[in-house]
Image (cartoon, rainbow, N blue to C red):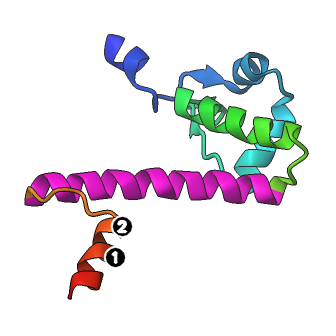
Amino acid sequence: MQDKLDDRDYPAYTMGLAADLLGVQPAFLRSLDAVGLLTPGRSAGGQRRYSRADLTLATRVRGLLDQNMPLAAAIRIVSLEHQLVAAHRRIADLEQSTGQPPVTPAVNEAERATK
């Protein structure tokens, strides 16, 4: 049981509870699902269930919208942020597996200048 509570991807929150926690209407969460930004889990009865990771993402989108960002732009920003985090993780994994130190663009420029 504790493992599920610690798992940020475990879909533990009903739509109503998730909406209450975020201070939004359930329609907001449904709209994020409709555009493919959130894909909540489903209960055995087919009801949406949200994880802590889903709530974090929805909070980020809500914050961008509160700054008068259009929904399409907010979705794009969040998507790019997610891709950037994934790229950083991949780089760290590759560096760890090869034992190579991180290479920065400045290092690459310096190497090219000396050749």
Name the image quarter holding residue 57.
Answer: top right
What are the residue bounds of the magenta stretch?
72-98
Residue 35's disc is none
Please state which of residues 11 and 105 is positioned toward the viewer in this rendering. Answer: 105
Q: Where residue 108 sits: x, y (%)?
A: 30, 74
Give the labeled residue for mark 2. 106
Q: Amino acid at mark 1?
A: Glu
Tell me whether circle 1 and circle 2 mark residues in contact (CB < 8 Å). yes
**Up-down relation of residue 6 to residue 96 (above or below):** above
Q: Where residue 59 sits: x, y (%)?
A: 70, 32
**Up-down relation of residue 24 to residue 65 (above or below):** above
Name the image quarter holding residue 66.
Answer: top right
In this view, the residue farthest toward the bottom is 115
71 to the left or right of 103: right
Q: Amino acid at mark 2?
A: Ala
Which residue is rendered at x = 73% and y = 42% of the image? 61
